[in-house]
Amino acid sequence: MARDPVLTFTDRGIFCPAGGFHIDPWRPVDRALVTHGHSDHARPGHGRYLATGAALPVIRHRLGDIAAEAIGWAEPRRIGDVTVSFHPAGHVPGSAQIRVEHRGEVWVVSGDYKTEADGLSEPFEPLRCDAFISECTFGLPIFRWAPQAQVMQDIADWWAANAAEGRISLVGAYGLGKAQRIMAALPALGPIHTHGAVEGPTAILRAQGYALPPTLPARAGAVPPGALVLAPPSALNTPWADRLGAPVAQAFASGWMALRGIRRRRGLATGFVISDHADWPGLNAAIAATGAERVFVTHGYTTPFRRWLAGQGRDARVVETGWSGDGEEPEGLE
């Protein structure tokens, strides 16, 4: 007789009937297990939260006074009739995959993840399981990332060239994860200034002990030539950017910069292809490492990726979720 699934898909989020909790729910629930602090995964309004101790400070910063409990990496926790544990997803500092075991059957919810270690986030940990719920933001073969060291050298060269010409270098990068990853990996070529939306998470992560360089506020008229400014992508090509204090060269750091049309529509001369999500080889390697009989794919290129997995002999299905890809979604993506 077939057993009931360990996890089910509801209009509030992924639900565990035997544990009585949801994972990254997008509507209010009594008990939420949260993979990381991005706004599409850690939402307000839940009765109780459980997240890694590394992720919880940012989640509290975003959501305010919540009833939340921290859990350590790989620490088994009994909830109802299941055992859960949190394991590194490599997406941003503190991000986790959630492993759920019930009567010997294991399901894993990946949240968002990337397989290349970035030197700041806890490196992705492959997990064996029977069913794997995977994002596929970049689930097409055209998405293949260069090694991080190469991309960071490209950014450093661009920053140095701008400084030699008396320009400020402004990089649009998502405020939690991408911005800190860039500032941590670049050589010290000059002062680093941050937009307020970047500085909030940066200060929290620095206080937790993550190795981040000193930063200064990016106030109008207060940024010297030769400085690097990190700001959310929404700050690019705005009056705020024009008032920084010197001529400004602008660039966007995102996996979507692999698509030439996206860069053109954003009116940017420079784009750096770097993402906190797995690329095509990363997605396939992660799924293969699970050994999962069933794979559920969500947000991104779900239909072609499901078709690809089915062609490889996997029981692959598309599931709709409320997750969006953490602000990396390009404007006007067709």
Image (tube, grey):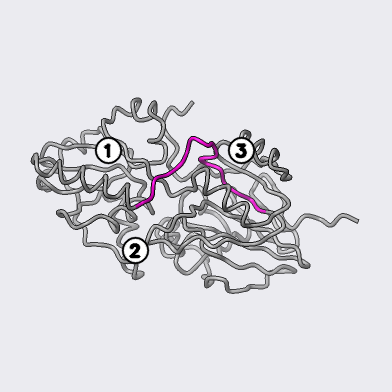
Please report the residue visible at 64 percent of the width from the left and 40 percent of the height from the top.
320
- Could you tell me which secondary element the residue under label 2 belongs to? helix
Single out the mark in the foreground, 3 or 1: 3
Q: Looking at numbered disc 3 in the image, what kind of residue is underneath it?
A: Phe
Q: Looking at numbered disc 1 in the image, what kind of residue is underneath it?
A: Ala
Please report whichever mark, 2 or 1, sits nearer to the chain's N-terminal start.
2
Image coordinates for residue 217, horizontal then vertical, percent: 20, 53
Numbered label attached to residue 251: 1
State the separation of the CA atoms marked 2 and 1.
25 Å
Residue assigned mark 2: 204
State the separation of the CA atoms marked 3 and 1.
30 Å
- Could you tell me which secondary element the residue under label 3 belongs to? helix
Residue 234 vertical position relative to residue 212 in the rendered view, above or below: above
The single residue placed furthest to the right in the displayed view is 1
Please report whichever mark, 3 or 2, sits nearer to the chain's N-terminal start.
2
| Neighbours of disc 3 within 10 Å: few (<14), some (14-19), many (20+) | many
In the picture, measured across the screen, residue 242 lies left or right of residue 289, that is left
In the picture, measured across the screen, residue 29 lies left or right of residue 205, that is right
- Could you tell me which secondary element the residue under label 1 belongs to? strand
Q: Magenta stretch: residue 145 in it?
A: yes
Single out the mark in the foreground, 2 or 1: 1
Q: For the image shown, how many numbered marks are present on the structure? A: 3
Image coordinates for residue 180, horizontal then vertical, percent: 32, 56
Query: Which SS does the magenta portion mostly show?
Result: loop
